[in-house]
Every structure is written in structure tokens, then in C-alpha cells.
Amino acid sequence: MVSVLTDKNVLKHYLELPQPDDQVQCEYIWIDGTGQGIRSKCRTLDFEPKDPTDCPVWNYDGSSTYQAEGSNSDMYLHPVAIYRDPFRRGKNKLVLCEVYKYNKTPAETNKRQSCKKAMDKARDVHPWFGIEQEYTLLDSTKYPFGWPKNGFPGPQGPYYCGVGATKVFGRDVVEAHYRACLYAGIKIAGCNAEVMPAQWEFQVGPCEGIDMGDQLWIARYILDRVAEDFGVVVTYDPKPMTGDWNGAGAHTNYSTKEMREPGGIKAIEEAIKKLGKQHARHIKAYDPKGGEDNKRRLTGHHETSSIEDFSAGVANRGASIRIPRQVAEDGMGYLEDRRPASNCDPYSVTEVIIVTTVLEE
């Protein structure tokens, strides 16, 4: 049987070939019709773009990405953010794009467009977000990476922030992803092994406004590319393994300028009251299937609150909203919304938070 993994040392020979100064590879990246999948394709520019507006609008076949019929398949890529390319390096770029249909209207999975409008309206409150992205590494058979083939690892307990070959699986992928994000210009804040073995988390932020969604999507793209090089699969499924195993979330930390200033705890408490009144609305926005994926995770067990109930508490990881203990002691800071699923669209999450807490009275 021929291995699907290629020899990276052979590739290295070609990547070491000198690249002409006036030829820059730009990888255009977008979200496909599933609302979860990431697609990309490359084009050469004869200059180094410094801003996304320097990059031309491009198109692709939407019938192959679940976004259009074959008889009218052209979709358009509008560059909105640009990053250094950690794979090709040099002057080469990663270009995040919004997707528009043939009639110049946003594609159904283009959640960025409405999120940007909301963030622009809320600009004066300076909303900061930080998202804790959990994910699980799988092997080529779609089984958790490093798990025994004819059974299960020992019960949860020693794996969270663990050290050692019997406690963590896939650290090479994690380290490579971290460094690649730093190179790209992603505001990656940290990483750790999670409660379920082969499950990990990285954090991005604090980012203001629309930058949160932009940076998380690019960080996900980089993770998928790194894992591809290692022959490992990344899943953002909120509950990849049934049974007595933790699910995966995208805990979202949020604050406004008022919350971050002395006495800001009052603004935090007011925001929590507003979030509680719109619980169902938020659950619908917190995974791509309107709550169906999150239902498998938000059971009231494994450090979650029930999907049916809204709760809040200081240092309570079983609540919908957690106020960190340090925030309660300082009387200012941020809140943590623990409801978003690991496969959420960060544009939808941050938009509904800002609409509920700031834009609607």
C-alpha cells in the first residue's frame, strides 16, 4: 500500500529555489458552504501587498464548495485581512477573504459582513474578545491520536496541562502551530493540553472588534495546514467522543472599555443580565447547526451548564457565564461565555454578544 504522506525533505529542495523579487504568492482563504470548512487557492502577484485592499478581487467555483449551482457557479473573493505566510515565508501572504455571490450579495456563510457592521456601530465602547479554541487531534482512521486501538486510555484526570508521553499526544503539532501563528502575526496568547487526551486548546486575543473573527479563522487555517504536514487530522466537533469524556468549546472572553476600568464589575453584571434574557438566541448562534451540535456538549456535566438553562457565577466552570475570581476581587475586567461550541463561527459569536450587550436596549 502506498503511503499518502510525502517526503518533506524532497519538498524542501524546491522551496529553497530562489523566488523572484517581483513574484509573490498569495494564498486566498475563505469559508465554504458548510460554515465550518476552510478552502484556499493561490495566485501570483507582481508586487508585495501591504494591505488587503492591494489584493485584487478573485473568483472560484462555488458549485464545488456547497455554495452555488453548476449553472451559475461563480463566487467572488473580497480580500479583508492579510498575514505573513508561515509555510512559504518571505514576502508571501495569507489573504483572508469574504465571499460574495454573483449578484454582489454576501454568501449565506459570510457572517463577517454583518459582524463588521455591528462592530463599527459599537466602536466607541472598544469591545475586546479572546477566544479559547479547543480541538481534538485524530489519526488517519479518525480515532483520537495516540489512543490505544483496542480500547480507551485511562480516565480523565492526568491529561489536562499534562507532561509526558503517557499523558499528552500530538505536542509536535501544537508547537509547530504556535510558532507559525506568531510568524503570521496572529495574536496567539497561549496553548495547553486539555482534559480529554488528544484534545488541545489555543487562545487568541485580546482582539478588538472584527479582528477576533479574522484572526481565529486564520489560526484555524494554519492549524489545519500544520496537521496536514504531520499526517494528523483536526476536528472541531464539540463532542468527538461519547461517554465520560469532556467535549470541546470555544470559550469567549469579552469586555468593553467600561468593564475594564475601576468599578467595571457593575457593567459586567449588567451585561450578564442582558445575556440571560437572550439565552436561546445565543445558543442558536453558538454553533453552525443552531444548537444541535452544542446539545451533545452542553449537558450540565463535564464542566458545562445545561443548554436549557442560563447561569452565571464567580469561578464556576459549570456555569453559562463565568466571572473569573480575580475579576471579582479587582472589581473590573471581563466575563467568560462558556457556551460557544468549538466549531462555532467567531463572527456569529462576537456579533450576537455585542448586539445583546451594547446595541440593543
Image (cartoon, helix red, strand yellow):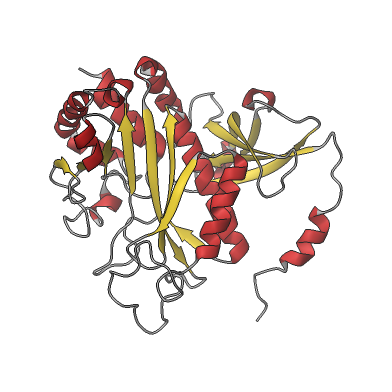
Q: How far from the left and from the top, in percent, is residue 17?
A: 86, 52
Compared with 95, 14 (above or below) is: below
Identify the residue shown where x is 20% and y is 32%: 275
Q: Nearer the viewer, residue 68 or 197?
A: 197
Q: Which residue in the rendered view is the most extreme toward the front?
A: 330
Identify the residue shown where x is 40% and y is 38%: 346
Compared with 199, 347 (above or below) is: above
Q: How far from the left and from the top, in percent, is residue 104?
A: 54, 23
Q: How far from the left and from the top, in percent, is residue 282?
A: 25, 36
Q: Quadrant of residue 92?
A: top right
Compared with 152, 199 (above or below) is: above
- Quadrant occupied by the C terminus: top left
In the image, 237: left or right of 96? left
Identify the residue shown where x is 38% and y is 33%: 129
Residue 33 shows in the view = no
Identify the residue shown where x is 42% and y is 76%: 166
- Quadrant occupied by the N terminus: bottom right
Q: What is the number of callouts on the image?
A: 0
Q: How far from the left and from the top, in percent, is residue 123?
A: 39, 17
Q: Nearer the viewer, residue 190 or 216?
A: 190
Residue 255 shows in the view = yes
